[in-house]
Image (cartoon, rainbow, N blue to C red):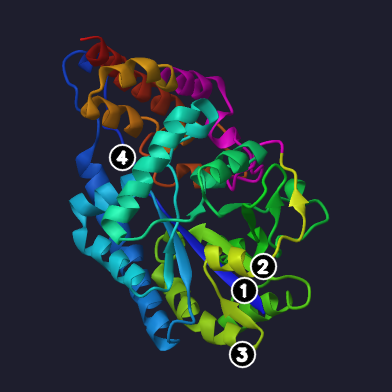
Amino acid sequence: MVSVCMYFQVHQPNRLRRYSFFDIGRDHFYEDDDKNCGILRKVANKCYLPTNQVILDLIKKHAGRFRVAYSLSGTAVDQLKKFSPETLDSFKRLVDTGCVEILSETYNHSLAFLYSKPEFHRQVELHRDMVRREFGVTPTAFRNTELIYSNDVAAEVERMGYKVILAEGADRVLGWRSPNFVYQPDPCAKLRLLLKNYRLSDDIAFRFSNRGWPEWPLTAEKFAGWVHQVNGNGETVNLFMDYETFGEHQWSDTGIFEFLAAMPDAIFTHPDFAFHTPSEVAEGCSPMAKLDVRDYVSWADVERDLTAWRGNPMQEDALEAIYGLEERVIAKGDPDLERVWRSLQTSDHFYYMCTKWFADGDVHKYFNPYPSPYDAYINFQNVLGDFEVTLAG
């Protein structure tokens, strides 16, 4: 039996308002609530609500045989509670079916693992507590921010008690191996590793509406045929993507919702295929081999490394500055200060500072509130300057 494992990232950052040098010391409110509300409600109406309904209908239609997984960042859940509670309720209805797994991650979708293991642990625990509180389940599977992964991440996640971790199936990680098997991270004894099949995932996430793509139009039957080719040469097809793929990146008029609704039927035409969640795949398959990943890998950009967030001096400076405040923030013992500090750790703030405007330019511009990466850096440093004033008070 070959598993089809679908995982969706649901994340929205707390975007910063335009904050000038002259605001420092005068105005301590940093977030652009109007923009955050407008974008969240737009995405909820175009993507989250209609896609959740399609997923719920598929679960009912297939009597529980259709199963998926989500990772909802803490900042996304906070915005849903504040701006679109009906959307959060729709996610809860999906979890209540028993056919949806919620994954664990850092609460603020941060790069904390790269800069502070204690803060990484705190954010993972905050996220785990949120999942228990909002959805009534305890996660057993983990995915780090933007699928950032290495041996070190795997070892730490195993020590935290998780059973499975997700990562990008980058070519330089796999070499001659296939992403369609379960692996064991090299330093781990029990943890299972699931790798994204980026070719099939990106056929949906990025190429679906591209009329210049030789395989356009992509039908459910054609895609299922590609998936079925794995039979006999793999145990799982891991389709990992942003949830905004449906209705936002790929608009409704492209036929993306019809494709999603038809895909399970097309997959089920082969009797040896079934849908499973990441934890179910990990439980049902033994590792094919150990996988040694010493350098960090992510699912961002063509390089699939960390350069989307720390590929230039601006990003490095901003990251070192925010994480350099850890000792002072924690010593204060003020929950409000900690909340603001963690919100400023969200990886999007540094993604906006990226200067890679070539093959991935359009991706970096999407939902970017700044006219240039330099504006993003200046605005962030102004906010951080005021936060330091508040911290010293």
- Quadrant where the image shows the C terminus: top left
Q: Is residue 114 above or below residue 303?
A: above
Q: CA distance from mark 1 to mark 3?
A: 14 Å
Q: Nearer the viewer, mark 4 or mark 1?
A: 1
Sequence-first tag of 1 and 3: 1
Q: Residue 356: x, y in percent?
A: 58, 35
Which quadrant of the view contains residue 20? Answer: top left
Where residue 269 is drawn, which disc sits there?
3
Amino acid bearing label 1: Ser
**On the rendered structure, is 272 left or right of 264?**
right
Q: Secondary structure at mark 1?
A: strand
Sequence-first tag of 4 and 3: 4
Q: Nearer the viewer, mark 1 or mark 3?
A: 1
Which quadrant of the view contains residue 247? Answer: bottom left
Where residue 98 is drawn, which disc sits there?
none
Whether tag 1 and tag 2 are in contact, CB under 8 A, the answer is yes
Task: Let me know if residue 104 is in the magenta part.
Answer: no
Amino acid bearing label 4: Asn
Out of 174 and 266, give the one closest to the viewer. Answer: 174
Question: In the rendered image, which residue does mark 1 sit on?
Answer: 3
**Few, some or many residues within 10 Å of mark 3 (<14, 14–19, 20+):** few
Where residue 285 is drawn, which disc sits there?
2
Q: Residue 11: x, y in percent?
A: 39, 50
**Few, some or many residues within 10 Å of mark 1 (<14, 14–19, 20+):** many
**Few, some or many residues within 10 Å of mark 4 (<14, 14–19, 20+):** many
Please report the bounds of the magenta region as a residue range. 294-321
Question: In the rendered image, which residue does mark 4 sit on?
Answer: 14
Sequence-first tag of 4 and 2: 4
Q: CA distance from mark 3 to mark 2?
A: 22 Å
The residue positioned 50% from the left and 78% from the top of the image is: 259
